[in-house]
Amino acid sequence: MADTILEALWETVLMVVASTLLSVVLGFIPAIVLTVTAKDGLHPNKAIYGILDFLVNVFRSFPFIILMIIIIPFTRLVAGKAIGTTAAIVPLTISAIPFVARIMESALRAVDPGVIEAAKSFGASDAQIIFRVSMKEAVPSILAGITLTIINLVGYSAMGGAIGAGGLGDVAIRYGYQEYRVEYLVVTSLVLIVFVQAVQFLGNLLYEKLS
């Protein structure tokens, strides 16, 4: 059991870390566009904000299992296969992008307007205001949001085990549920709980230091 659980834990860590990094990078772009085009943004644009806001809400509404099945052709195109740890990174990333975008947008829009106005008065460009003022002020909130994203992805990766994503969810289903071996269900659940607690602890620690 130990070897099986350790291998599954490594697969879960791989899926979560890879999808988190990709979703943060890809979610940053819509977050910036939403922030800039919002009614209180640097360049308000009701049409662009409305369309992007709608798309983000739509993709956030999809249950992960359904999303994972719907994008199987795209997953096969990107990863070369539709099941397995590597393939699961694709739907995990897609499911997290709108979540990350919304978190970053909220953090950036929560920056004190007075700070932004002060930067404008000193002649700061839009890029400087976004990257050197707003981003700097929003880092603690963004970090807290990324911590929440990681925890959600841990749960999604476990659910993905139902359709062959690998990781701890796959072990729990194949050995614990299908073979009626309760000890596997108990151990995988405990490992996931410890994993989530560790992520939350580290996230809180970094948030306090950066704040």
Image: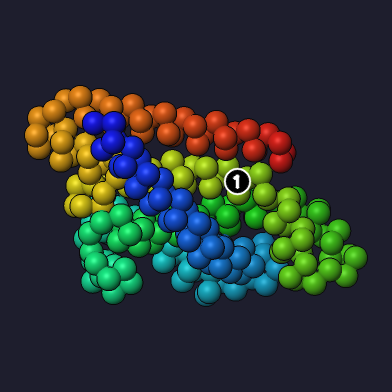
Counting from the top left corner in percent of width and height, residue 51 is at 46, 71
Query: In the rendered view, would you say 192 is above or below 18?
Result: above
Residue positioned 36% across, 33% down in the render: 192
Disc 1 element:
helix
Compared across the picture, whether 184 is left or right of 46 comes to left
Residue 186 visible (yes or no):
yes
Q: How many marks?
A: 1
Residue positioned 66% across, 44% down in the render: 140
Counting from the top left corner in percent of width and height, residue 43 is at 67, 72
Residue positioned 70% across, 56% down in the render: 135
Compared across the picture, whether 59 is left or right of 208 comes to left
Nearest the eye: 98 or 165: 165
Nearest the eye: 162 or 43: 162
Query: In the rendered view, would you say 21 is above or below 197?
Result: below
Q: Quadrant of the C terminus?
A: top right
Q: Amino acid at mark 1?
A: Leu
Nearest the eye: 44 or 35: 35
Residue 38 visible (yes or no):
no
Residue beneath label 1, please? 143
Residue positioned 28% across, 74% down in the render: 77
